Image: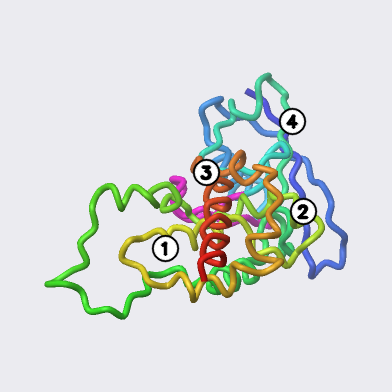
């Protein structure tokens, strides 16, 4: 089928403002959009820039806005976004990040916030016997957010960033929840310093866009609210 891609382009070295470039090509309905982009880059325009790595929905590097929705290009089929021959597919970089070039955004602010919640197991207590035992029920408490691939789609979809760029962000809180609810972890107080602030969990307004747009189907808003509840209960009891 024939498809028309309208891609947001930007090269800071050119001195030109962001603009839209149109590419007309053909593809099978079951082709992945990432493959279409790669074909355009290899055969039509070597200057087209985007991130990719595993191409299997695991690394999260090819997150972008496709027809106004945050998606992974490697998990999006042409038929998902183009219903008829000659359909137009608009592709833009993620929102709320500085654009480095075309569909590539600057990720340093995201990972600064990510590091602030200490996304790793904290426990200085010596383990009993050889390891810290955990039941399947305890593991299930934080199973859902372990699927996060840090693609940053939820950051792009979140309306809070339209007004507050200092917001710590949905994925970051979900990652903090993952370790706070781990029965082996003792890092709640250390993470609370970054979470319990006006720009931390309390900035979330429950728009649910992070949950709707998560390519891994993570219940992000639920874990944000669970984190709010736990911190509130901690403050009431201490």
Q: Secondary structure at mark 1?
A: helix
At a point 79% along the width and 70% down the height, the residue shown is 13
What is the C-alpha distance between the residues marked 1 and 2? 39 Å
Earlier in the chain: of badge 1 and badge 2, it is 2
Quadrant of residue 91 within the rendered picture = top right
Q: Residue furthest front?
A: 237
Left or right of 183 on screen, residue 227: right
Q: Is residue 210 above or below residue 81?
A: below
Q: Earlier in the sequence, mark 3 or mark 1?
A: 1
**177 is higher (above) or lower (below) than 56:** below
Q: Position of residue 30 (x, y in %)?
A: 51, 27
Task: Report how far apart the C-alphas of labels 2 and 3 lie in the structure.
Answer: 32 Å
Q: Is residue 56 magenta?
A: yes
Which residue does the image show at 87% across and 60% down from the upper left?
Answer: 17
Q: Is residue 96 magenta?
A: no
Kindly indicate the quadrant of the structure image that contains residue 68. Answer: top right
- Residue at screen point 23% across, 52% down: 135
Residue marked by disc 3:
219
Q: Nearer the viewer, residue 37 or 224?
A: 224
Name the foreground residue: 167 vs 32: 167
Please name the residue that numbered disc 2 is placed on: 9
Q: Which residue is mark 4?
A: 88
Of pointers 2 and 3, the one earlier in the residue sequence:
2
Q: Which residue is mark 1?
A: 179
N-term-proximal mark, 4 vs 2: 2
User: Does the image show residue 48?
Assistant: no
Say what secondary structure mark 4 lies in.
Answer: strand
Count neighbours of disc 2 (C-alpha within 10 A) and say few if under 14, some if 14 to 19, many if 20 or more: many
Between disc 1 and disc 4, the foreground one is 1
């Amino acid at each position: 089928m024939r498809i028309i891609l309208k891609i947001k382009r930007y090269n800071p070295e050119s001195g030109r403002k962001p603009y839209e470039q149109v590419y007309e090509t053909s593809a099978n309905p079951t082709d992945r959009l990432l493959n279409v982009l790669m074909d355009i880059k290899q055969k039509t325009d070597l200057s087209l820039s985007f991130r990719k790595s595993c191409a299997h929905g695991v690394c999260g590097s090819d997150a972008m806005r496709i027809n106004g929705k945050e998606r992974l290009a490697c998990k999006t089929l042409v038929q998902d976004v183009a219903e008829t021959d000659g359909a137009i597919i608009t592709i833009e970089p993620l929102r709320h990040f500085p654009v480095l070039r075309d569909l590539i955004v600057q990720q340093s602010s995201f990972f600064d916030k990510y590091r602030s919640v200490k996304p790793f197991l904290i426990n200085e207590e010596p383990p009993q016997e050889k390891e810290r035992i955990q039941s399947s029920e305890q593991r299930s408490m934080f199973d859902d957010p372990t699927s996060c691939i840090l693609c940053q789609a939820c950051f792009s979809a979140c309306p809070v960033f339209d007004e507050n760029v200092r917001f710590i962000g949905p994925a970051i809180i979900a990652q903090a929840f993952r370790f706070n609810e781990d029965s082996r972890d003792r890092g709640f107080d250390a993470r609370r310093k970054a979470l319990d602030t006006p720009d931390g969990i309390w900035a979330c307004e429950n728009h649910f866009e992070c949950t709707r747009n998560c390519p891994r189907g993570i219940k992000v808003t639920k874990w944000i609210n669970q984190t709010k509840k736990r911190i509130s209960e901690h403050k009431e009891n201490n």
